[in-house]
Image (tube, grey):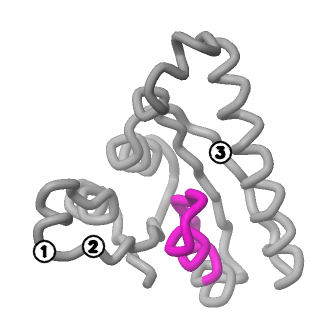
Amino acid sequence: MVLLVALDESKPGWTALEYALDEHADDDIVVAHVVDPSQSGYGEFAHLGTEAMHERMQADASELFETARERATEQGCEITTELLTGQPAPTIVEYATDHDVDRIVVGSHGRSGFSRVLLGSVAERIARRAPVPVTIAR
């Protein structure tokens, strides 16, 4: 089985990875991080330029992946990493559609009420559009 773990820097993102490592240690685990240049802070592109922003995002992702590999190694697992670019939900769904992914694991940020309606939920969008089963870890 191939699991795709959507990882960001949040606690729920790490919970998703820990779930995959605990429950699917014998499966192939692909850890994907999506960088969305459109979500950069105000003026970063104008100040740093697109090339510098892209390099910074890649460096941040490298650190994230290194920590993920360390956690996997501590549990006797190996992971593969993928750095993707775009909006998180559709990019994760597209990756799962285009590759032999059997399940997606994503963390839940636990929003409820008005903030969930206003901001939406990446996990919910992935679950609604994914071509494979989705586990939302809390």
Secondary element type, mark 3: strand
Rounded to the nearest angstrom, the CA distance separating label 2 from label 3 is 27 Å
Q: Nearer the viewer, residue 48 or 19?
A: 48
Find out whether residue 102 is within the magenta segment: no
Counting other residues with Cα less than 10 Å from the Cα at mark 2, is it few (<14), some (14-19), or many (20 or more)? Answer: few
Extreme bottom residue here?
Answer: 23
Residue 61: quarter of image = top right
Rounded to the nearest angstrom, the CA distance separating label 1 from label 3 is 33 Å
Identify which residue is drawn at 67% across, 67% down. 28
What residue does disc 2 label?
111
In the displayed structure image, the side of residue 54 where residue 42 appears, left or right? left
In the displayed structure image, the side of residue 124 where residue 74 appears, left or right? right
Rounded to the nearest angstrom, the CA distance separating label 2 from label 1 is 7 Å
Quadrant, the N terminus: bottom right
Q: Amino acid at mark 1?
A: Gly
Q: Position of residue 27 (x, y in %)?
A: 66, 75
Identify which residue is drawn at 65% across, 45% down. 82
The answer to the question of whether label 2 and label 1 lie on touching residues, with beta carbons closer than 8 A, is yes
Q: Amino acid at mark 3?
A: Glu
Residue 48 versus residue 84 in the image, above or below = above
Q: Amino acid at mark 2?
A: Arg
Q: Nearer the viewer, residue 95 or 123?
A: 123
Residue 110: quarter of image = bottom left
What residue does disc 3 label?
82
Which of disc 3 and disc 2 is earlier in sequence? 3
Magenta segment boundaries in residue numbering? 1-18
Residue 16 versus residue 22 in the image, above or below = above
What residue does disc 1 label?
113
